[in-house]
Amino acid sequence: MDAIGKKVVEVKNITTKFGKKVVHDNISLYVNKGEIYGLLGGSGSGKSTLLNEMIMLLKPTKGEIKVLGKSVTDISKKDALYLKHNWGVLFQSGALFSSLNVRENIDTVLKEYTNLSKKTRDEIIKLKIELVGLKMDVLGLYPSELSGGMIKRVALARALVMDPKILFLDEPTSGLDPVGAQEFDDMLYNLRNMLGFSVVMVTHDLDTVWNIVDRLALLGNSKVVAEGTLKEVLKVDNPIVNSFFKGKRGMLRRNADGK
Amino acid sequence: MKFLKVMKKNNSLILFCIDHWDMYHARQMQEEIDYALKKSQNINNIIIDLSGLKDIDTAGAVIIHEMIEELKKDKKVNLLKASKEEEKFIDFIYASIAKEKGTPAIIKPLNFLERTGKYFVDLFKDIWLFTVFIGQATTSFFMYISHPKRIRFKSIVKGIENAGVNALPIIALTSFLVGVVVAYQSAVQLQKFGANIFIVDMIGISVTRELSPLITAIVVAGRSGSSYTAQIGAMKITRELDAMETMGFNLFEFIVLPRIIALMIAMPLMIFFADLIGIFGGMVVSNYQIDISYAEFLKRLQSVLDLKHFYIGFLKGPVFALLIASIGCFRGLQVEQNTESIGRYTTVSVVNAIFLVIACDALFSVIFTKLGV
């Protein structure tokens, strides 16, 4: 394993424009290996856009993004496939294949990319289902029969199935009740500690930020307003930081933690 | 051996796991394990040494776990630990395997009799549901009539444009070609009897009475019936229909009836259009093939084409439209919460619509013949 501190994602001078609208104006940030990194910002601040650029669903107008040392803004087919084998993506809505049951949903990549026997694949699937805290009874169910929390968990199991080096999450706790969101955070935190992957997540759940995020970037006005650990970010005196963390919701949290 | 070194020492067998145990080399790992298992047949003491592992992923850990379980059945297995980092991972995986709760439900495939039974039960259920659907549409229609303000004129006009006006080019092309084909085939036969002029009767009556209603209906079923199903199905999956329901919008008033009414208005007009083009196609062929001039053709047409033939074809329009649009909407509302079912129900919708149109056409033929029209 490589030394901790190596950068798994590097965003260098990214500019993104949709028509005349400037979403990102020359922004840079990086994610260290093994850390849980939060992309924060209000609606329309371009955090999901940035995530989509990292996972090659969108192309920035200018600049370079490196994931696991490969430049995704200019990449060969072979490297792109390498990346796709080595990352896991969890979409906000789960994006489970609605015509496949849970077992088949998790099985798709394994079946496509490896020559594992069916028995071994089944064991891996069961293992992943256990890791995300579900019972084996769900394996035969279809996405339409699952609750919101279960969909997120199954989607996480699907994202984890290839033992990814890096996990991209788009608002993983949105739509979950506070208990479910807390459980999801804990689960993610423990899995990260046990399996050692890095996490990049878009979130506006302040609880998540407080509990499990190691470093974060706050986006606003097409720029990175603040970057670093939560402590560092809180020290920045900027109206966007203030409204984000020092509003009523943030205050409650700060008071409770005695910070 | 790349992943598994097998050594005999005293009366125990040592299995050395080395190198990278990852999911991309699963087949080779499995082969080497099978080989080792064969070698271990008469040996009771097995030592599995993981200290040589360079890297391991979930698949590797699971495969080793399966091997251990297999050996443990009738042998004594000693496990020598891997390096610290790998050991932590392996322990975590094995602990998780041990924790697995519940059993996956096994779904037994149906046998032939069960499938047949299910098919017919589903068929009758569908017929029943369709009857209910038609009933609901009818009551909503009377609501419309008693409260004309609730009629969605805008959607109806838009529907006429989409299903009717925009379909004219393809209808023109198909009915022209059908006119040409019929004229060609009959011209050859009629020439044998020297009854060339009867081609006008032939084309005039067959096109207006049978062919253009049928061709139009088939084109419309493929074009609009399918789009109704897909559109309504997608609205169901995205829960737009549920949203409308909660706002108190009646689905039949807002979605179903405008489509049915639009198609019932557009269809007869399209049939009339198809009549003209189809006859024109026949006329062109008659002119070139058997030298019946356009003037001659039209003169003969006036005397042989009774208005009743045109009316019969024209009246089939609303009936076919009702069938196509209601099947399209009905199947759309049946779509389930998965994307595959949109495709399935769209296919079913077109197949049902075309079948019903043809069945209905046959019924018309019998009735009109009995009535002597």
Image (tube, grey):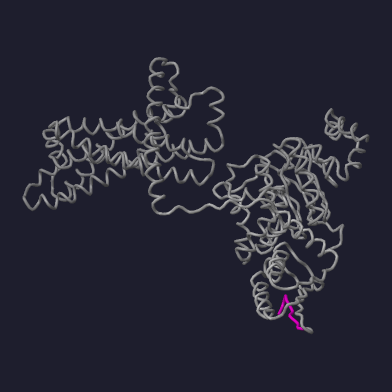
Q: Which residues are magenta?
A: B1-8
**Camera-side residue of A126 and B200:** A126
At a point 57% along the width and 29% down the height, the residue shown is: B243
Question: Is A98 drawn above or below residue B156 in the view shown?
Answer: below
Q: Position of residue A94 (x, y in %)?
A: 65, 45
**Camera-side residue of B236 and A129:** A129
Q: Position of residue B260 (x, y in %)?
A: 38, 30
At a point 80% along the width and 74% down the height, the residue shown is: B52
Instruction: Write down the quadrant of residue B276 in the picture.
Output: top left
**Camera-side residue of B300 and A45:** A45
Q: Quadrant of the C terminus of chain A?
A: top right
Question: Is A226 drawn above or below residue A119 in the view shown?
Answer: above
Q: Position of residue A5 (x, y in %)?
A: 87, 57
Residue B37 lies in magenta, yes or no? no
Spot the residue most to the left. B193
Question: Is B264 drawn above or below residue A212 in the view shown?
Answer: above
